[in-house]
Image: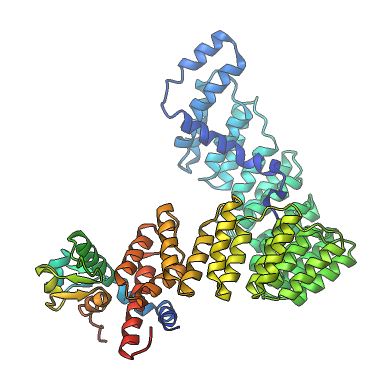
Amino acid sequence: MLPQRIKKTITDNPKKLANLIDLVNLPSTLREFVGHSQASRLGCFMRVWSYIKENNLQDPNNKNVVNCDEKLRSILLGKPQVDLAELPALIKLHFPKKLK
Amino acid sequence: MGKIPPSFRPAITYSLVKKPPLTEASSSIQTPTPIPPLHFPKKSSKKNDDKLSRKPQQSKQHPAIQNLLESPDLPSAKKIFNSIAATTKATLDLRFHNALLQSYASVSTVPDSISLLQHMVKTNPEFSPDRSTYHILLSQSCRAPDSSLSPVHQTLNFMVSNGFKPNQVTTDIVIRSLCEVGRFDDAVELVKEMSLKHSPPDSFTFNFLVKCLCKCRTLSTVYGFIEEMKNSFGIKPDLVTYTILIDNVCNSKNLREATRLLGVLNECGFKPDCFVYNTIMKGYCMLSRGSEAIEVFNKMKEEGVEPDLVTYNTLIFGLSKAGRVKEARKYLDIMVEKGHFPDAVTYTSLMNGMCREGNALGALALLEEMQRKSCSPNSCTYNTLLHGLCKCRLLEKGIDLYREMKSAGIKLETASYATLVRTLCRAGRVAEAYEVFDYAIESKSLTDVAAYTTLESTLKWLKKAKEQGHAL
């Protein structure tokens, strides 16, 4: 099973966990949305997801799709509609891999 | 399964040390409002009622003790004791002194605590410390940050010089205190010394120490210790000791050693009891060796040992694990016939087996049967079922069950959460997967990180599978 294998690599690899929960300096677009200058990738995701829920942005006909408002569009590549399934990947774009 | 009940210990040993501070603590909670202390003694001295006068006084003073003796400074502790002794007209009893000493000893060093005790005896001639007073000092000296045993020796010598020869209770307190703070080697050293000089441990203390050693030392160390105690001090391992050893080797999957120990047990003239058999059976079950587990069960019957609830639960668990669900089901019926009441563990084991076989509907039917017999399922039961239903691609039934769990506030386990999320995503119901994610976090079933990682990796896997055109 693939997902279990991915999960295992994450628990085995502390670096992967670190890039999920470490606080980083946010790029300016995201900073405006989140309201802090620093956040973790996890915190960011939670903030976006709760923003979607609070503002009822899920499409009433297909809950899997989010109709972005202007604020949300600014951080999600300007897309008018986003699939919930690609939300984590889109947020990850704001957190580039650190170069050593 | 097959564990030694903790109630084997006589309560008296512990109560000597632990009870006084505990009752003080509770009385201080009951009366948090301070009332001028002078008021009560006056009243009671007029009444001349001994019982009534003592009670309110104690509850008034002890909060003060707890607050006042926070500093390890000896002169100030003495001063506080003096002032309490001077302002109180009724006689201070042993419990008061013990409580005061306990509170001081927990923040101070051993020599200072001894000085305080000596000071108490000198100032208040009516007070004569008894064994429990010394035991308080002793248990604190074992917890001293000192890495050597000198504080313990100091206290023991002090005790002996005041005419109290250490007895089995003393040994027990020393051993338990040392083990509590993880000083197992010191405990072993001291138990030998105590056996030589004062009093050998009773079987409870001895077995406690063996159990502690089993957890953190190699098997050969434990055997060495048992052998030495037998040869030097005549302390023979009993049935409980062997049960502990067998349990330990079974947990490390060393069943050959367990069988050998069973032989030794018989040689020593012990007849294995239900606990021993349960332990061995557990060992086989953990390795999914169903036939051997049944053999143990039959042997029990041959030997005339009546199987108990744990025996049946272990056997049903083991057979289910080994994929022999039909037989497990048969034992459930036998168990009922013999007058045992199957509990949530029994049913959950069986459900687990059925789900592994792919018979999730059968497991669901078992849930109904279980509820009909007024046995209430626990969170493990629900999680097992949810996991099974999702694995068998019975998503609708799984969602029904999930809703039931959610309304009852039952937490999700990692495996059942991951399976549910994966099954939902695979069916293209990502929004519902997010809902489950929310519930997992809200109910504190999983940490945010664990819940998110699962969700993210599932979605990633889904995308990949779609790209590669796999059938979902």
Asked if one can make out residue B337 in the rendered structure from this viewpoint, the answer is yes
Q: Looking at the image, which is closer to me, A24 or B370? A: B370
- Tell me what residue is drawn at x 48 percent, y 74 percent: B391
Query: Residue B372's spot in the image, x, y percent?
Result: 58, 52
Q: Is residue B217 left or right of residue B430?
A: right
Q: Where is residue A42 shown, x and y percent of the image?
A: 29, 70
Q: Is residue B153 visible?
A: no
Towards the viewer: B379 or B160? B379
Looking at the image, residue A14 sits to the left or right of residue B346; the answer is: left
Q: Identify the residue at image location x=67%, y=74%.
A: B324
Q: Is residue B463 above or below residue B340?
A: below
Q: Quadrant of the N terminus of chain B?
A: bottom right
Along the line of sight, the residue nearer the viewer: B399 or B200 = B399
Residue visible at 19% across and 70% down in the picture: A66
Q: Residue furthest top?
A: B46
Residue A61: % across, % down: 21, 68
Reply above or below: A16 against A57: below
Which residue does the image show at 34% across and 70% down from the upper left? B452
